[in-house]
Image: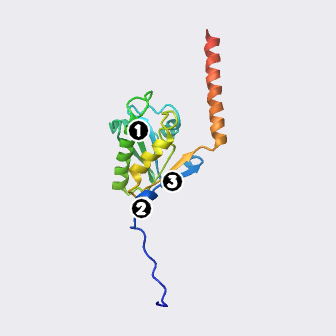
């Protein structure tokens, strides 16, 4: 044995075993993630973004015409560059009122991964994509994420609203629904 201290090993180029990739989970506001992390969410080809978290992306990052100009189809990923980050718009369906498939989601994730690799993106934050208004099952979506990203050095952080905020949003949605119904009755 040598009495000299061992040199530190550079682990930057060592890839983790395939079966060790997992998304990181955070309870909180997606938009509070570090400003140099990419963001991702799902939209339709028509770029409507009129409900759910898509409304917040539309308000915060604008660029609807820029997205439409990219002429991306279902299974592809449109991209905006905002300050120090890329914002990924996973095109998972043709029209806003339709539902995505796991195949269209997977294809759009693959397209996003390709952009990440080419542009050196190693960290992405996202909501539980496809599982809100699009009604996909998170257990299956998380498997798709793992399949797509397991051989990369790209980490994915998945944000969920704290239970209190989820409850408040649900109550707010119900209140709006009741108000609209009352207004409809009042007008008639």
| Whole-number angstrom distance, CA of label 3 to CA of label 1 | 29 Å
Q: Residue at coordinates 35% horizontally, 55% vertically from top-left?
A: 117
Pick the residue in front: 58 or 171. Answer: 171
Disc 3 crowd, CA 10 A, few/some/many (<14, 14-19, 20+): few
Label 2 belongs to which residue?
17
Tell which of 13 and 45 is nearer to you.
Answer: 13
Residue 54 visible in the picture: yes
Q: Residues within 10 Å of mark 1 (few under 14, many from 20)?
A: some
Q: Is residue 185 above or below residue 113?
A: above
Q: Earlier in the sequence, mark 2 or mark 3?
A: 2
Closer to the chain start, of discs 2 and 1, is: 2
Which residue is identified by label 1? 102
Q: Who comes first in sequence, dot 3 or dot 1?
A: 3
Q: Quadrant of residue 91?
A: top left
Relative depth, front residue between 170 and 6: 6
What kind of element bears circle 1?
Answer: helix
Q: Secondary structure at mark 3?
A: loop
Q: Are marks 2 and 1 in contact (CB under 8 Å)?
A: no
Percent of width and height locating residue 35: 51, 53
Residue visible at 45% across and 27% down? 97
Which of the labelled discs sits on residue 35, or is there none?
3
In the image: residue 12, left or right of residue 34:
left
- Give the residue displayed 46% in from the left and 90% down from the top: 2
Work out whether 22 lies above or below 76.
below
Residue 66 in sight here: no
Give the spatial CA distance, label 2 vs label 3. Answer: 29 Å
Give the percent coordinates (x, y) of residue 25.
55, 51
């Amino acid at each position: 044995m040598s009495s000299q201290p061992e040199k530190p090993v550079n682990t930057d180029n060592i890839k983790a075993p395939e079966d060790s990739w997992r998304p990181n989970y955070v309870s909180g506001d997606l938009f509070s993630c570090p400003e140099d992390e990419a963001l991702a969410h799902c939209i339709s080809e028509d770029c409507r973004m009129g409900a759910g978290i898509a409304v917040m992306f539309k308000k915060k990052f604008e660029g609807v015409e820029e997205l439409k100009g990219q002429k991306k189809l279902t299974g592809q990923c449109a991209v905006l560059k905002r300050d120090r980050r890329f914002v990924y718009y996973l095109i998972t369906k043709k029209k806003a009122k339709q539902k995505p498939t796991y195949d269209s989601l997977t294809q759009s994730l693959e397209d996003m991964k390709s952009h990440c690799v080419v542009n050196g993106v190693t960290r992405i934050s996202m909501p539980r994509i496809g599982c809100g208004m699009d009604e996909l099952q998170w257990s299956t979506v998380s498997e798709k994420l793992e399949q797509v990203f397991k051989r990369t050095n790209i980490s994915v952080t998945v944000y969920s609203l704290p239970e209190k905020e989820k409850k408040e949003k649900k109550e707010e949605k119900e209140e709006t629904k009741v108000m609209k119904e009352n207004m409809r009755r009042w007008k008639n």
